[in-house]
Amino acid sequence: MKFFVTLGAVALAASIVGSPALAADTKSVAISTIVEVPALVETKQGILEALAERGFVEGKNLEIDYQNANGNMPTQQQIAKKFVGDAPDVIAPITTPTAQAMIAATSDIPIVFSTVTDPIKAKLISQYVQPGGNVTGVSDAAPIGAQLDMFKEILPDLKKIGFIYNPGLDNSLSTLEQVKLQGAERGIEVVESAAPTTNEVILATKKLIGEVEAVYVPNDTTVVAALEAILKIGQDVDLPIFTGETGGVARGAVASVGLDYVAVGHIAGNMVADILEGKAPGEIDAVLAYDQADSFKVVVNLGAAKAMGVTIPDSIMSRATQVID
Amino acid sequence: MSLYEILGTLETGFIFGIVALGAYLTFQVLDFPDLTIEGSFPLGAAVAATLMVGGDWNPWLATLAGGVAGFAAGFLTALLNVRFKILHILAGILVAISLYSINLRIMSGPNKPLLQVDSVFDSFDWVGLPGYIINPIILGVIVLVFKLALDAFLSTGWGISMRAAGANPAMAEANGVNVGNMKLFGVGAANAMTAISGALFAQIFGASDAYMGIGVIIIGLASVIVGMSVLPSRTIFLATLACVIGATLYRFAVALALNADFLGFQASDVQFITAVLVMIALIAKQSGSLRKIFGKRGS
């Protein structure tokens, strides 16, 4: 008991003494994520880059408080309380539960969410245009139409595509719904294969062999964690594997059209800068990141294509932003 | 640490105080290491959230319904152990992992937002105090009610039988106590408490989420152990008080860790710092008692 009190006193004293000297007109932004995975770290990087471009530089005239809940919801809840108590100029939650905790904790401090797939379903906002209140942000829904078009360009006979996902992730369910919808318009049937944990990914992949002409791996943290295992199966049986995120192509998937998470962060960072310059969050339209992109990132992996028995047509090679050998 | 953060930490601490009371009942009183709570915490949240959003239920009734679901989960674990002789730890694991799928079914998805729904905390709007002040008070009263109810129960005839069943099952059986029934009821009650705290947590958090249960066992157990190490726990009244205080101290350790960036720690170090703070508290307590022992010998 005494130790906790002593520690508390030390922490309090040091946090008062320890504040670095910053410019007088310093702004503060609090950023949090539920876990640290590449897409979320890149989003944060994008936010900081955009802020710096707009003249808000960390350590100069901008104070950043970054907290990661280590996957733990009670800790996420405490981070929300800490942020509200610290009263920064803007709170920038990354991912759905993080945003929900922040919104439940304050209706005054401006909030800019990012890397949330369906903010309306998650009740973060009620509409994209002029969302009102203290919340706006960026959805990272994948450009699925553009992706399916490219898969068909590579595999003109594509009729059935496998979809491996964790049914416990809201983002994956929204993606599945979109792939089904957009697939139906293009005559592609979706064969679902559920993998509730990373251990079940191999089985979920093997189930699809012979059933489908290609496999789509969505941006699902559980499944992407075992991407190498899926890729190996793809190479063994000549089953082309596509990913919803371009990062997966560098790891050995055939190709993808995608969002760059640094770019998603950029859009959110610009919203944060708008608010720091005096705009009300409710007047800033929330956006789908793929609507904002002038062009998508097209990434192909020639080595992987060869190993999985497909050739990339020249039409794609000519517009590829990145080619991996 | 701001006042807002301190009150927020108390809020989370009191919610997990209820989990710690449940863990005390199973681990300490019944000697039944129950892992079901990792699933019954999100189960309570899922049931309450679904009833509140989809069924327009009164939030208090929905929270209570979450507790009933939690009781059923705990009862099932104990049943697998008592009737079908499955090892208690395994029975708990089996029920907890099946609850993950069941929770997804209940919520028809992994996440149920509660952001624009009236919660139990909204029924105290008439007091006129802002949420960050009234919520910890409400939760403090709720955890106190649970603590006193558990104290009272454990001194009734049933309660004493339950303690006997945990302390010495053979002796209890010989004295006419039905040890199996005690486990069924006790583990059920502990999970009802855990599920209610899950339902309350979801209403504070703004959503019920399938991943809400991660780490609940560790938090519950650590709370019981920290509390009992820091406070004397000779009587049941003191032991249950220690559980609630332990849960609150644990959350304060997390809060300190969140504020430890000035020492050069980064956001991802939170778990480590929390663990070290708890270790320091336990070691400090132990070395204190050691000094007492040596002091007596010296005199």
Image (cartoon, coloured by chain):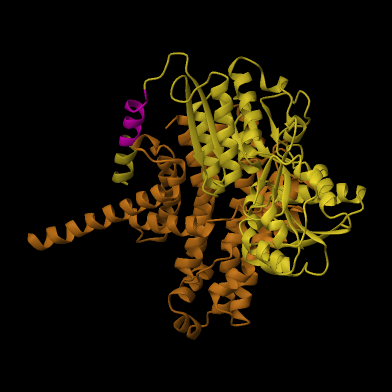
Chain colours: A yellow, B orange
* Residue A144 pos. (x, y %): 79, 44
Quarter of image, res B116: top right
The stretch drawn in magenta includes residue A266: no
* In-front residue for pair B30/A292: A292
Q: Is residue B72 visible?
A: no
Range of magenta residues: A10-20
Rendering coords of residue A2 (x, y %): 29, 44
Q: Residue at x 20, y 59 (%)?
A: B290
Tell whether A298 sits left or right of B230: right
- Which residue is farthest bottom? B174
Query: Is the magenta region chiefly helix, strand or loop?
Result: helix
The residue drawn where x is 72% and y is 66% is A204
Number of numbered discs overlaid on the protein picture: 0
| x then y, percent, for residue A221 | 64, 52
- Which residue is rendered at x = 77% and y = 52% of the image? A312
| Image-based side of A217 in relation to B33, left or right | right
